[in-house]
Image (cartoon, helix red, strand yellow):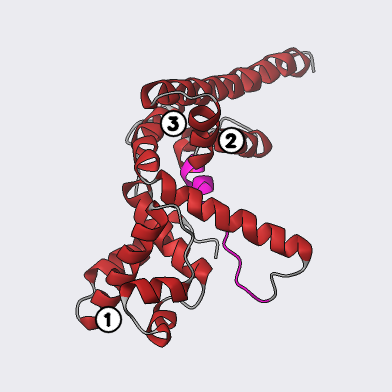
Amino acid sequence: MNVSRQQAAVSEDAGSAARGPRARTRRLMLETATRLMQAGATPSVSEVAEAAEVSRATAYRYFPSQAALVQAVVNEGLGPILTWKSASTDPERRVVELFDTAMPRIEAFEATFKAALKLSLDQWARRQAGTLGGEPAFTRGHRVDLLKDAIAPLKDRLPPREFKRLAQALSLIFGVEVLIVLKDIWGLDSRKRMSVAQWAASALVRAAVVESMAKGDRSAPAIATK
């Protein structure tokens, strides 16, 4: 269920291009599921079918599991984030641009993303308890591709391990978790949340570059004496 943002964007394009009763039914289910998730629920396929007045059999043909349904709603919520691109070659600028694109959208669909996070945590708890059974897992991972893309100009400047570590560090301050920390815990408004998140992201990028340059400077004399 770990769908890349490119795959999700292609699937969404294909879905939006489709016409006819099937496309309308799928759209109705997505809109219904989105409405329920924006209200704070994490609905099952059956619950969405009932709310949309669609038969369960029909609903499961479109979304065979709750994980598939929630993933589709999440992709809808992410919208332009999935197709984000930057023309800049400056990694710090690119990260700032990504946050500029993503944060307002994440705030607009906060309830949806929190409902998806709730499903992920609930499945983890049931897996730990041995009660998940054969239910398909809902996994999250769009930020991995997004953040690697944002810092792509550093791919040839940082060792692979350091490049991956930077992407991992940035992932801690990207996504709905930022709202949980900065809004729910710290009580910051939207402007201050964006300021803190962008400051932290820029600091991480600069630190990674400075650290890598320092390592290179230390190794230079040793090479020169050979």
Relative image position of residue 86 (x, y in whole percent): 34, 37
Residue at the disc numbered 2: 172
Q: Which mark is residue 46?
A: none
Q: Residue at x 64, y 23 (%)?
A: 212
Q: What span is colored magenta in the figure?
A: 134-148
Q: Residue at x 74, y 18 (%)?
A: 219
Relative image position of residue 17 (x, y in whole percent): 23, 70
Residue at the disc numbered 3: 95
> Disc 2 residue type?
Leu
Dot 1: few (<14), some (14–19), or many (≥20) neighbours within 10 Å?
Answer: few
Q: Is residue 156 visible?
A: no
Q: Nearer the viewer, residue 204 or 130?
A: 130
> Disc 1 residue type?
Arg
Which element type, helix, strand or loop, lies under badge 1? helix
Distance, label 2 to label 1, CA atoms, is 39 Å
Relative image position of residue 44 (x, y in whole percent): 49, 70
Which element type, helix, strand or loop, lies under badge 2? loop
Q: Residue at x 24, y 75 (%)?
A: 24
Distance, label 3 to label 1, CA atoms, is 39 Å
Comparing labels 3 and 1, the label whose residue is closer to the camera: 1
Does residue 90 appear to the left or right of 125 in the view shown? left
- Membership of 215 in magenta stretch: no
- Membership of 142 in magenta stretch: yes
Q: Which mark is residue 22?
A: 1
Q: Residue at x 62, y 73 (%)?
A: 135
Residue 91 vertical placement versus 130 (above, below):
above
